[in-house]
Image (cartoon, rainbow, N blue to C red):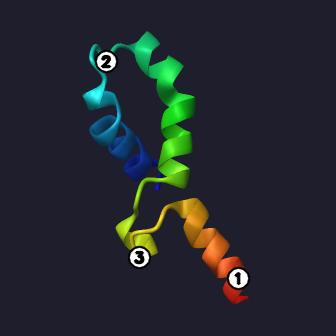
Amino acid sequence: MAESLVKTIKRDYASLTERPNATTVMQQLGAWFEHYNTRHPHSALKYLSPRRFRERQALNN
């Protein structure tokens, strides 16, 4: 799971940063994780964000 998350962060976030260096990446990680958890669709979660998927699960239980 961790390797998949790192790959996604590198592919979908860090590679799109104008000058991706360690300092820039570290400054942006919080915002990227927030976006990843609230807006980024995940195929394994029926193309919902993790937060939305958990909200739907809670409503169905």
Image spot of residue 38 (x, y percent): 54, 53
- First-in-chain label (3 vs 1): 3
Marks counted in the figure total: 3
**Nearest-to-viewer mark from 1 and 2:** 1
Image spot of residue 14 (x, y percent): 33, 29
Task: State the CA–CA distance, disc 1 to disc 2.
Answer: 40 Å
Task: State the CA–CA distance, disc 3 to disc 1.
Answer: 16 Å
Q: Which mark is residue 59?
A: 1
Q: Is residue 19 above or below residue 44?
A: above
Name the amino acid type tagged 1: Leu
In the picture, measured across the screen, residue 25 lies left or right of residue 33, that is: left
At x 70%, y 82%, the residue is 59
In the picture, measured across the screen, residue 32 lies left or right of residue 19, that is: right
Residue at disc 2, secondary structure: loop
Q: Nearer the viewer, residue 57 or 6?
A: 57
In the picture, measured across the screen, residue 61 lies left or right of residue 25, that is: right
Q: Is residue 23 above or below residue 3?
A: above
- First-in-chain label (1 vs 2): 2
Q: Which residue matches tag 3?
A: 46
At x 42%, y 54%, the residue is 40
Mark 1 in CB contact with mark 2 (< 8 angstroms): no
Mark 2 in CB contact with mark 3 (< 8 angstroms): no
Identify the image quadrant of the C terminus.
bottom right
Q: Which residue matches tag 2?
A: 20
Q: Is residue 49 above or below residue 10?
A: below
Image spot of residue 17 (x, y percent): 31, 23
Residue at disc 3, secondary structure: loop
- First-in-chain label (2 vs 3): 2
Asked where in the image residue 42 lies, by quadrant, the reply is bottom left
**Nearest-to-viewer mark from 3 and 1:** 1
Name the amino acid type tagged 2: Pro
